Structures are given as C-alpha cells and as structure tokens.
Image: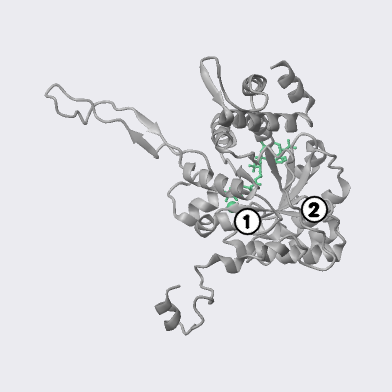
Amino acid sequence: MSRTRAALLGCGRYPYAVSREDSSHHMRSAKDFFAPLAVGAPTPVTEVPARPSRMIHFFDPSNPKMAAKVPDMVGVSDVLLGNLEDAVVADKKEAAREGLVTIAKETDFGEHTQLWTRINSLDSPWVLDDLTRLVTEVGDTLDVIMVPKVQGPEDIHYIDRILAQLEAKGGVQRPILVHAILETARGMANVEEIAGASPRMQGISLGPADLAADRRMKTTRVGGGHPGYLVRQDPAKGADGAPDYQGERPVFQQDLWHYTIARMVDACAMHGIFPFYGPFGDIKDTVACEDQFRNAFLLGCVGAWSLHPVQIEIAKKVFSPSAEDVAHARRVKEAMPDGRGAVMIDGKMEDDASWKQCMVVLELAERLSANDPELAKMYEEA
Ligand SMILES: CCC(=O)SCCNC(=O)CCNC(=O)[C@H](O)C(C)(C)COP(=O)(O)OP(=O)(O)OC[C@H]1O[C@@H](n2cnc3c(N)ncnc32)[C@H](O)[C@@H]1OP(=O)(O)O
Ligand SMILES: O=CC(=O)O
Ligand SMILES: [Mg+2]
C-alpha cells in the first residue's frame, strides 16, 4: 500500500499496516504451521503421502445401484469418492450423506483403495452437516475431503480449523487431508495461495465445467477440447501471387485447458501437493477422454476423475508410465548410475537433468507396481 493510500485510509502505521494486497496476513507463522488447530486434533502431516491416485472414481451414495457396486470397485479404483455435491439433487443430499456413512462403515477398503468424499460448497445449507456427520462418524476411514468452488486460501483455512475441531471431537487418529477443486476465476487467480494454505492440502483438481461457466467461456462441454479453438494455416498464394483466401487451409485444434492445467501443476509442484485433471463428460468418447487424460499426465498431473466405470481403465492406462518409457529410464539409470555427466543413448544426449526426468518415471512406476502385480510384470518384462 502506498504511503498516500495508507494516509487516506487513515492507517498511519505504515509500513506495519497490513494491506489486502499483502498476502502475508493469510499465513500462520512457519513455526506453528504444523501445529494442530484444535486441542486433541491429530498432528498435521509434513509431507503428503504419495499414494497411487490415478483415478478418483465418483459415485452417488444415494443411488442404490452405484452404492451396490462400491465393494466390487475396491482394489479396482485407486480412489473411490462418495459425491455429495453437484449431480446429487437437493432432496437426495441427506440420503447421499447417510449412504456414505453406511458405506464407509460397512466396506473394507483394503490397503490400496482410498475413500474420499466431495462435500457440498461452503455457502450451501448442507456443508456443515456433511462435515460434522462424516468426520465424527467415519473420520478414520476418510482419507481426503474434496472441497468444491474454492475461492481462496480463506476457504481452506476455514476447512482446516473446523476439521481439527471435528477430528478432536470424534477422536480421529490421523489428519484428514483436503483437496480443492479449481473451478472459479478467483480460485484460479489464487491457485498458488490455495495450494500452500494448509499442511492438509493433498492436491487440486481442475473443474472445467464450473470454471468455464464462471469465466464465461463459451463452451457447453464438460472438459476436453473444442473444434472451434484452433489456429489456421496461412492461405497459399493463388496464380496471381496474391493469397488465395478461398483455398483449402489446414486447421490445428488447440488445447483449451493448457494454460489452466499448466498453472495448476506449477502451483501444486511448488507446494509439494498433487495436481489432477477433473471430469470428462463425453462418456462414450473413450478416445478423446484418453487424449485429455494424457495431455494432463504429460503436463504433470497424477490422475483424473472417473465418472463412469469405463473411465477407470482409461485412467489406469494413461496415468501409469508406459513400458517403453520405463525401459528407457532404466537404460539411462544404468548408463549414469550416479546421475552425473553426459552420455549418448540411441543418438540422444542424456545428462543430469534428463536423468532426473527418468527418475520421475521410475519412481512412479515403482510406486504403482508395488500395488499392482500386472503392472509390475509389464515393467519387469519391459
Ligand atoms: C461436471 C461437473 C462435475 O461435478 S462431474 C462429477 C459429478 N458427476 C457425477 O458424479 C456423475 C457420475 N456418473 C453418473 O451419474 C453416471 O455414470 C451417468 C453419467 C449418469 C451415466 O449413468 P448410466 O446412464 O446409468 O450409465 P450406464 O447405463 O452405462 O451404467 C452402467 C452400469 O454402471 C453403473 N454406473 C454408472 N456410473 C457409475 C459410477 N459412477 N459408479 C458406479 N456405477 C456406475 C450404472 O448404475 C449401471 O448399473 P447396472 O448395470 O444398471 O446395475
Ligand atoms: O466439478 C467439476 C466441474 O468441472 O465443475
Ligand atoms: Mg464443479
């Protein structure tokens, strides 16, 4: 804040006055960042556990058919998420919440499948009961709470404190982590602060549907590309040497979500949390779904949402490194065991930096294959 503006606002204590532009007022001191926010709450984690989360499979706990499928999806989906927010109609909100409590109590999720929920938005009439009921009843079974329509770090601070209070009340043994959906323009502008707002932050998902609406983008699709978002090749020259504007000109479709995903990935990487692509609404278009997921994977995302059982397999395929990439990474590691220097492999230069790229692939492959014998076999044979 300028001196003049501080004087005009009547805060003569400049430079100590805290302005809205100064983000430091959002932060707790570094020393107490990892202290519990309520007496009796579990100690926050200092590092987010890197559990396989290639797909976050959504189900509606108020839908008996979907609920009945949950036990069979344990071990199939890395994450099962009981959705309470959008897609669950208002008169089913309580049934969905109670359905999720029952599922959490009655299902053995084993070692490899996590249980998440997506609560209603913070301004809704349901969210307080969502949190109170779930955390005190099944808090030890819930791994992550997904918070929709997060606008800024203040939303995470609210969730952080109330979770600590409820964990203490319910005797929850380990902290429940928090995942934010990036689906408002303000959330987008604050994405770095959201990512670093609490030690509970596990990750962020892109929510392309709500984000498109909030930004007033003119697409009615749920994620994926758009044929109208393109660049066109220059016109060829006609017989007279002038541009032939009527001739055929190839067009190249561009990625509508490139900026958003890339920025989200940077915010997450900077804070040691995990980025995810969100929903792909065209369930029947499994090819384009795979393309969208792969774009996100290549840019750094660790997983995507699955809205229908058919999308689980797509995510598994895309978010597990390919056998070819694993084989290449191993060759680089063998050629440069300590990751230093420069070598040629198949006519390509490899050095300290490309060695690190290879380590990213190998570490992910190792982590995933520890839970998945089929994948382990594929990598072994690669
Ligand atoms: C866009 C912004 C967002 O917030 S996205 C996140 C919110 N939306 C959701 O969670 C949607 C979840 N998915 C669904 O509601 C359904 O999959 C939709 C898209 C409506 C399609 O359902 P439906 O027409 O029944 O598909 P289908 O006939 O091919 O289903 C075959 C069998 O599979 C079941 N199924 C369907 N989806 C799920 C699911 N997500 N989890 C578990 N089971 C699912 C169906 O019930 C059907 O079962 P059955 O064979 O009849 O016993
Ligand atoms: O919640 C997800 C979205 O795309 O909106
Ligand atoms: Mg949404």
- Percent coordinates x, y for residue 11 in the rendering: 49, 82
Q: Which residue appears at 54% of the width and 74% of the height?
A: 18
Q: Residue pushed farthest front?
A: 341
Residue 346 versus residue 299 in the image, above or below = above
Q: Which residue appears at 65% of the width and 30% of the height?
A: 359
Q: Is residue 374 left or right of residue 303?
A: right
- Percent coordinates x, y for residue 232 in the rendering: 32, 33
- Percent coordinates x, y for residue 305 in the rendering: 64, 42
First in sequence: mark 2 or mark 1?
2
Distance between mark 2 and mark 1 Cα atoms: 32 Å
Circle 1: residue type: Gly
Circle 2: residue type: Gly
Tell me whether circle 2 and circle 1 mark residues in contact (CB < 8 Å).
no
Quarter of the rendering containing residue 286 = top right
Q: Which residue appears at 72% of the width and 57% of the height?
A: 92
Q: Which residue appears at 53% of the width and 77% of the height?
A: 17
- Percent coordinates x, y for residue 238 in the rendering: 17, 24
Q: Is residue 314 visible?
A: no
Q: Is residue 25 visible?
A: yes
Q: Is residue 67 left or right of residue 334?
A: right
Judge the density around disc 2: few (<14), some (14-19), many (≥20) Cα neighbours within 10 Å.
Answer: some
Residue under label 2, please give it.
99
Number of labels in the image equals 2
Residue closest to the eye, 146 or 281: 146
Q: Mark 2 against mark 1, which lies toward the viewer?
A: 1
Residue under label 1, please give it.
196
Residue closest to the eye, 372 or 207: 372
